[in-house]
Amino acid sequence: MGVSSQTLEITVISGENVHVKEESYVVVRAESLKSCTTKAAKNTDIIINNNHCSSLISWNEKLLLEIPMHARSITFEVQCKNSRASSARPVGVARIAISDILLGGSNGFDGDSNGHNVLSYRLRDWDGRRNGVIHFSVRRMTAAPPVENTVKELVEDQKKTKESGEEVVLGVPVWWNYPNIII
């Protein structure tokens, strides 16, 4: 049996040239209903040359994202709260293949001395137009214990509980609607 998910430490560093006037935040998810969200940050204008103005949103926030084994991509979505409405407005999205994130360099997952792999990806708005760049780093957390060990631990806990006189039910999930089996 294998592991059902893995965990990545994602540090959302900043957004560059993201066109937004309100405070914005980043929602990160991996093809799952579970998501991680940064705190809101304000857009800051930085003048590089007399002719060129650049903007920077700095989040510098670490998030622990659980990646299900079926996931093929991670989505970074920059959103801002609409001042007139209570809902959030999407500003830019980057959907990145997990293989690109985990395989960072040509020799596999290579980052700095702490194992962080720093990446930058273009953000697109919902019409497909460019809307800045998001900078983030990724570090793979230690692997979860194999499912076999977890089941063994559950059985041992059940034996201990049974010896103490308490009653516990141990359930095993079954895929009951498998499409290829005809009875």
Image: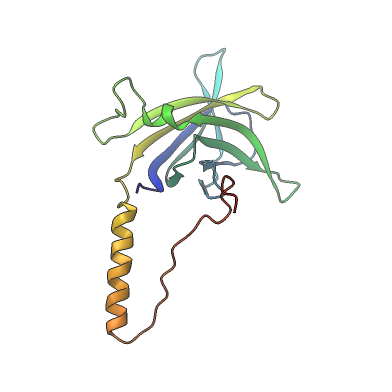
- Residue at left offset 49%, top offset 39%: 71
- Residue at left offset 33%, top offset 22%: 105
- Residue at left offset 27%, top offset 83%: 163
Residue lying at the far bottom of the rendered structure: 165
**Left-right relation of 15 to 149:** right
Q: Nearer the viewer, residue 179 or 115?
A: 179
In the rendered image of this protein, does residue 16 appear above or below residue 178?
above
Residue lying at the far front of the rendered structure: 183
Colour scheme used in the picture?
rainbow
**Left-right relation of 96 to 137:** right
The x and y percentages for residue 171 are 44, 67
In the rendered image of this protein, does residue 157 appear above or below residue 29?
below
Q: Quadrant of residue 106?
A: top left
The x and y percentages for residue 55 are 55, 27
The x and y percentages for residue 147 are 34, 54
Q: How many marks?
A: 0
Q: Nearer the viewer, residue 112 or 51?
A: 112
The x and y percentages for residue 151 are 33, 61
- Residue at left offset 49%, top offset 18%: 48
Residue lying at the far top of the rendered structure: 51
Quarter in which the C terminus is drawn: bottom right
Q: Quadrant of residue 157?
A: bottom left
Residue lying at the far left of the rendered structure: 113
